[in-house]
Amino acid sequence: MEVILKDDVKNLGYKNDIVTVKSGYGRNYLLPQGLAILADKTNKKIVAENVRQAAHKAEKIKTEAQSIANQIGDVAFDIKAKIGETGKIFGRVTTLQLAEALKAKGVDVDRKRISFDQEPASAGEYTATLNLHKEVKHQVRFNVVAE
């Protein structure tokens, strides 16, 4: 089943992409949630026209995402967490904490656009990926330290 995505869907595609999915996934999840529309001839023409008109806006958004990535640079952030004697974390380090650390440095990134390369389980240095744009991804280093 071919569908046109109306919004970015993690591990599937980005807005206005035409993707092939299993019919059950399309009928029971993507279409009812409003995340996709059926990819018939008329919808494909409409999306092609919308993409053509939005190309200029997309370039501007991409340059903004690139400037955010340049602004962050190679800075390492410290995330405070409760840590036991063995070095293990009590609770979790979340993307929200990393988003707040970025915001404190003057960069506003939605927490949903942050993913950990390796889930932090103990004190130490980790990396996270910021998905700023479909063509702009940035690696951020952060240290988990004791409170």
Image (cartoon, grey):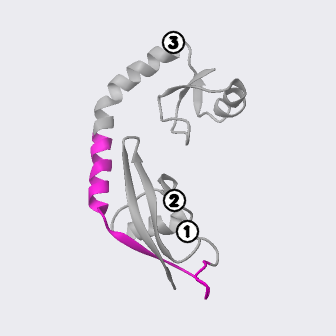
Q: Residue at x 31, y 55 (%)?
A: 69
Question: 10 Å neighbourhood of mark 3: few (<14), some, or many (≥20)?
Answer: few
Q: Position of residue 60 (x, y in %)?
A: 28, 40
Q: Position of residue 92 (x, y in %)?
A: 61, 71
Q: Is residue 31 left or right of residue 81?
A: right
Circle 2: residue type: Phe
How many marks overall?
Answer: 3
139, above or below 20, in the image: below
Q: Where does label 3 land, which residue? A: 42
Circle 1: residue type: Pro
Question: 10 Å neighbourhood of mark 1: few (<14), some, or many (≥20)?
Answer: some
Q: Quadrant of the N terminus?
A: top right
Magenta residues span 60-89
**Callout 3: SS:** helix
User: Is 86 in front, or is 11?
Assistant: 86
Q: Which mark is residue 116?
A: 2
User: Is 23 in front, or is 50?
Assistant: 23
27, above or below 140, in the image: above
Q: Residue at x 52, y 78 (%)?
A: 123
Q: CA distance from mark 2 to mark 1?
A: 8 Å
Circle 3: residue type: Thr
Q: Position of residue 24 (x, y in %)?
A: 72, 27
